[in-house]
Image (tube, grey):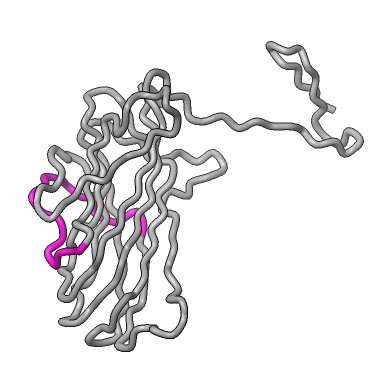
Amino acid sequence: MAVLEGGVSAALAGIGVEASSPLHVIPKPIPYGALGHYRVNHRCALVASQAANSRLFEVRNTHATNLIVPTRLVVRIQQTGAFTANLSDSLDLFKCTTFTAVDTTNTVTPTVSVKRSSLAAPPGAAAIRGLTVAGNSAGMTGGNLTKDGGSFCQIPFLAYTTANTTTLTPFQLVDCFDDVNGTSPFVFVQNEGFEIELRVVFGAAASMEVYFDFSWAEVTAF
């Protein structure tokens, strides 16, 4: 039977079947040094004739040396009105490089929360933009970025000619940064980040809402 001895406390922990006693483990956050951990959310509408590849949400690392490590991105989609025709579509997420400027048209800047008041002020080096809450068929424009050749996450959804008006409308929920069990997370250096866009154009009648919930750590080394 293996035994672990604490380097500071000198406490011993038996590994294996030791009277079937559990091992008490305290998980620690990603070390942030003088920087911090942050969280933000955003909501926007998708409207009639929403363009294919229209951008809805984006994050860019602006710092020359600090790193942005995403820890969570939950996206929810909900149909709120009737569509011209039944539609199978998706939101596609792309890693971006040579990301030298975020979008400037049809954008809002969501307010970021810091997870502990003693951490560096939000949003740190993260430049975050979301599509205006009321939506715009062209999506966000005016930025400068290069998408990877393929998306790293797709969120499929269906839309229908008859909107649900009698019961709670179910929504689609996906965690896009669900790497676990020791796999490496995304790590964004300066002028890297990600963007979320619509894949297929909407019809002349359409109405949906999308909710983004994003968390990350800003660190000096990882």
| Rendered view: 104 above or below 135 | above
The quarter of the picture where residue 64 lies is top left
Where are the magenta residues, as a range? 134-153
Q: Residue at x 30, y 88 (%)?
A: 161
**For the N terminus, which image quadrant?**
top right
Q: Nearer the viewer, residue 206 or 187?
A: 206
Looking at the image, residue 211 sits to the left or right of residue 166; the answer is left
Instruction: Please provide percent x and percent y for residue 125.
Output: 26, 30
- Magenta: main secondary structure: loop
Looking at the image, residue 100 sits to the left or right of residue 193; the answer is left
| Rendered view: 125 above or below 183 | above
Q: Residue at x 31, y 67 (%)?
A: 209
Instruction: Please provide percent x and percent y for residue 175.
Output: 44, 55
Instruction: Please provide percent x and percent y for residue 79.
Output: 34, 75
Residue found at the very far right of the displayed protein: 19
Looking at the image, residue 88 sits to the left or right of residue 72; the answer is left
Q: Residue at x 35, y 36 (%)?
A: 187
Q: Is residue 113 magenta?
A: no
Q: Residue at x 38, y 51 (%)?
A: 213
Looking at the image, residue 13 sits to the left or right of residue 83; the answer is right
Instruction: Please provide percent x and percent y for residue 5.
Output: 75, 17
| Rendered view: 204 above or below 208 | below
